[in-house]
Image: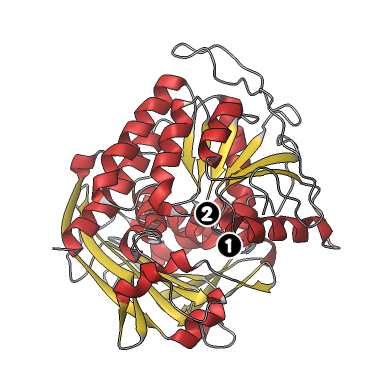
Amino acid sequence: MNKNLIPMIAVSILLSACGGGQKPTQKDKSTPNFTGAKGEVKLMTLDPGHFHAALVQKSMYEQIDPTVYVYAPEGEDVIQHLGRIDAFNKRTDNPTAWVEKVYTGTEYLEKMLAEKPGNVMMVAGNNAKKTEYIQKAVEAGLNVFADKPMVITPEGFPLIEQAFQTAEEKGVLLYDIMTERHEITSIIQRELANNEEIFGGLIDGTPEQPAVTKESVHHFSKMVAGSALKRPAWFFDTAQQGEGIVDVTTHLVDLVQWGCFPEVTLNKSDVQMLTAKRWTTAISPVQFEKVTGMKEYPEFLKKDVAEGQLNVYSNGEMVYKLKGKVAKVSVIWNFEAPAGTGDTHFSIMRGDRCNVMIKQGKEENYKPTVYIEANAACDLMAFEPNLKKAVEQKIAAKYVGLRLNKLSDRLWSVEVPAQYSVGHEAHFGQVTEKFLQYLKDGKLPEWEVPNMIVKYYTTTEAMKLAQK
């Protein structure tokens, strides 16, 4: 592969240095001015090693210029990324029209920072390098749209905390991609749990019965955008991908904050870590070859191989207090889901009057479903009409067609029209639209940055405790 420019598939390749429009700010006069105009956001994708980088471009956006600048090291990661974009461009149903201008070489980061043909950097890939990428980008006055996690070690946490401070000083936005906030069942659970007439208040909880529990099950072998996902070998190295307790838990910790304390500014002092643990998933050579295409474990994974199997610290659990409320977060990675199933999510928020749950098991045909379970002491004569009003009038004012189904004396489910259950891949487009609005506004909500800091403090503190 040529060190400087690479031809790829049907993607136009040519890199030229150009600058975006700028606006003065109080702290830095080099930050770009966003008005919502067509094509004013010029995207740069750095080292796209994770398929999430491509999912941001599964749709077109009027505010984003169709020319995207890719800077990456040579290798399979960038080839697969460009292949996914090319597939989006060539699909028969609503094809995209991205033009990828690609630079590859060992100095890809330095090249991007020197040329800066765009004003927003998107990064989704090797997490060992991501914190540095973010630091350098905001120091250069670039807005950053980052896949989770932004940091994977306790030692790296102060660096990401400083990056947020630098972003503020430079007048740029640093934002992570929290897709699960756009899952309709998470939205409904949040709305119901913050309706005092129905829920009362969140109980304090105990480690044995937390106030809120979030659990997710993921799989190394899966389908993405209609094709079998090929994972890079480094994805199985926790030194590069991060352990499970600091990776997928990012979403779950975020949902705890976002669902239990909506728009409340949190502080690190609000977090008290109680317990944390981690354990491995064993991957056989045959399984490893299936998802990576490699017949042997690379040298950097040999440290994790025992009795011929790769053991990955992909699983983790933490129990902690947030503003005095006990939360439990856990993530499990299996190799492959049984036929007809996929990644699953379970959540329960326990209130004084009822519990609001999300289940996604066999009974739900593996589709996330919201349940409301009235507590034994709840006055059903008052509770049921209030619940019906909340679902079919208040929440349905935003999401037309929601219906409440009574399953037993104290148990209900929420029927959600199919158009709102868009799936994980579509959530990337929804988060991107939200970020574009923040760019136009010139700021994030006041609580977002403090709460991102608290989120990564929580995950890295859990890792610190789990490794003792």
At x 45%, y 65%, the residue is 235
Left/right placement of residue 391 relative to residue 252 reads: right
The 10 Å Cα crowd at callout 2, few under 14, some 14 to 19, many 20 or more, is many
Residue 220: x and y, percent? 49, 75
Residue 436: x and y, percent? 62, 36
Residue 427: x and y, percent? 60, 55
Q: What residue is disc 2 on?
A: 179
At x 28%, y 43%, the residue is 157
Q: Is residue 241 above or below residue 272?
A: below
At x 71%, y 60%, the residue is 83
Q: What residue is disc 1 on?
A: 424
Colour setup of the view: secondary structure
Residue 170 is at least partly visible in this image: yes
Q: Quadrant of residue 465?
A: bottom left
State the SS at label 2: helix
Residue 155: x and y, percent? 24, 46
Per the model, the C-alpha gap separating discs 1 and 2 is 7 Å
Check the image and name the residue furthest to the front: 2
